[in-house]
Amino acid sequence: MLDEALASRFEFGTQAVEDKYGRHLSGRRLADDAPVVMTVLDPSLKIGPTEANAVSVASKKLAASRWGAALLSIEVGRTEGGNTYIVSESVGLESLKSLLRTSGGLTPAQALAIAYRVAATLKAASEVGVRHLDISSASIHVALEPEVKVFVARLGFANLLPTYNPARKNEAHHGTAEYMAPEVCAGRYGDESADLYGLGILLYEMIAGKPPFMSSSPSTTIKRQVYEKPLPLHLVKPGMGQLDAYERLVTRLLAKDPKGRPGSAAEVMEAIQALKNEAYGNAALGVEPTRATVVDVISHLEAELVVPVVATSSDPVPSGRETMVFTGLAEAIEKAQAAAQSQSSGAPAASIPAGGSRPTEAFDPSFVVAAVEAAQKAAAQGAGPGATESPEERTQALPGLTPDFIAAQSNVAAPDAESTQAWTAVSAPTPTSAAGLSESPTAANASEDWFIKGKAIAEASIPPEDRESRKETRMFWVVAAAVAILLAIAVAVYFESRPGGAPGELPVAPEVAPAVTPAPSPVTAPVPVPVPAPAPKPAVSAAPAVPVAAPVSPAVAPAVQVAVPVPAPAVRPESAVVPVQKAAPSTKPFPVEEKPAVKAATPPPKPAPAVKPAPVAKPAPAPEPQMSDSDRQDKVKPLIKAGRDAYNAGNYADAIAKYNEALAMDKGNALVRKLLEQAKAKLDQ
């Protein structure tokens, strides 16, 4: 439901259309039954009263020019629910986008007539400092019959949303990707040249039926706007004649470099007029008539923008310690100082030359009031406050600059004596030159000393950009620390899950293997020890070998006796390994000395059986020489004739023999095979 205040002035329907700005409701104004459209801005866009009020300011400028083709925003306010709304003028005409969707395209004469009126509206808006920056077929309302009428909507909406920023692609921005100029797509602010680029897109779309750059996503379309050239119109509409002059104008307007486009909307209007005289004489060029009266534009948000510049000294200090911005402080203090100097010296007061700029200064409201009152008081007395008063009196003259007030502003303890001197130096006005600048360097830098020496900077005095940068810096280090911790955990888990353990550690298996493998040696070692005992069985020819072999058995026997009881204690298998390792050196030299004896006792090897000679392979029979076809036929024909003679004589066996010989020479002869079958059949009968 509408608020009572809105319902008393407007009546809206129930059907709403939504886009990136919010919801749009069509209705009428009850006073004159004029059609209107109310736009309820989306709260997620966080559009403040300053941005919404800027729309009404732009409409007031256009209303003062009484331009008839501009649809103005006649009211801006806030609903009872807190949502910002904008009520704009409307007409009962369809949009150019809807017209192109149904017709598929216009003739060059019709397109030039519409473009001429749009260019005239852009020219009127540019003269009052208003930029559209969203020229599209959806914001143009047209009628072709009985006469051409063109109206441009959403003038001033460029103040609601920021321009496109490539670094923040997902944030809402002003403009439509299919109509944005390349410089706007690159992140720069648009100007009149950007509106002319959008007009070139319209001229292209009115002939082709669609914009030159369309993609599945806005980001892709924006890239194409920057890097690609549109497909020429004579290739899009090959059957349409007289497009050369029209396409030259479109090419100029769609230049990637703003310097290559026409300089202004007035120049575009002249180019369209030249095209009519050259090739399109039936183009109905003209503009909408001006308004009879100035439209009343209302903004209910101006009250939210009022900032109290002047306040009495009795007003309490704001609880939030806000820092207010004033531009008239420097002028007020300078005038008071100049008046005091002129009264004391009799010289005329120096003034700032015309066109000089004043610095913007930020102070607490109570400090501003106290400074102005002190300057006025000094001027009334005819002398500067610093001429006859002590620092304590000057501090008392400015109640807003006491040490307690300084400590309260920064929520810290009162500053020391050094910082107090800096504050008192600020409160004392200094002589100024003819240019209005301070002649004392100490006094000129005093305003900076109290920030550094007093160390009493309030949190509200920190610019929002610095606070945001500090937050971003803290967030960056928090994220970096979290990532480092996760990487350390991942590395630890990885090395723990590896079978070989951490890098640099030796595997455990090679250390255990020597202790495990000797375990069966006590059992197997004694078994081969007695084997050399049978060595004396054969008569050894070498005499010294027999006495050497005799002591082997007594030497080995004790080793066997020691090794047998060792396996009994199963608790410590290592003890079984020790005697075997000790006995090993005693047995090593004996096998070395017995090897010759064993070799001497072995019988001589049997002679190898005689190898039978391999049978001599018979030579392969020489291949019969191949006959030519003529020779083969010469030999086959007599055999066939002899076979027929035998067949006719009733000697079927001879006929079969002749036919087989002929078939052996010519296996593919079908006649011989058929005669052979006949002879076999007769023989069987």
Image: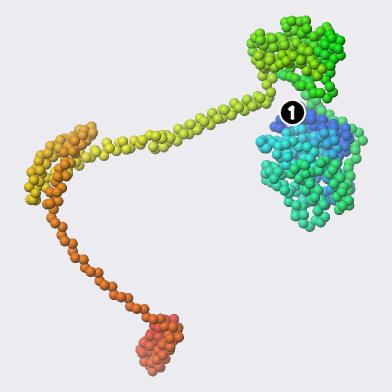
**Which residue is nearer to you in this view: 432 or 154?**
432
Q: Secondary structure at mark 1?
A: loop
Which residue sits at x=15%, y=43%?
590
Across and down, in percent, residue 32 comes to: 88, 34
Across and down, in percent, residue 485 comes to: 51, 30
Q: Residue furthest right?
A: 292
Image: 457 above or below 288: above
Which residue sits at x=68%, y=14%?
450
Q: Label 1 neighbourhood size at 10 Å, few (<14), some (14-19), many (20+)?
A: few
Say whether residue 291 is left or right of residue 456. Answer: right
Q: Is residue 452 visible?
A: yes
Callout 1 amino acid: Gly
Across and down, in percent, residue 192 comes to: 80, 38
**Which residue is nearer to you in this view: 420 or 8?**
420
Which residue sits at x=10%, y=43%?
548
Quadrant of the rendered image containing residue 592: top left
| Quadrant location of the N terminus in the rendered image | top right
- Which colouring convention does the figure follow? rainbow
Q: Which residue is mark 1?
A: 48
Quadrant of the rendered image containing residue 336: top right
**Which residue is nearer to you in this view: 289 or 581?**
581
How many marks overall?
A: 1
Q: Is residue 2 visible?
A: no
Which residue sits at x=71%, y=37%?
187
Say whether residue 227 is left or right of residue 54. Answer: left
Q: Residue furthest bottom?
A: 649
Across and down, in percent, residue 41 comes to: 74, 33
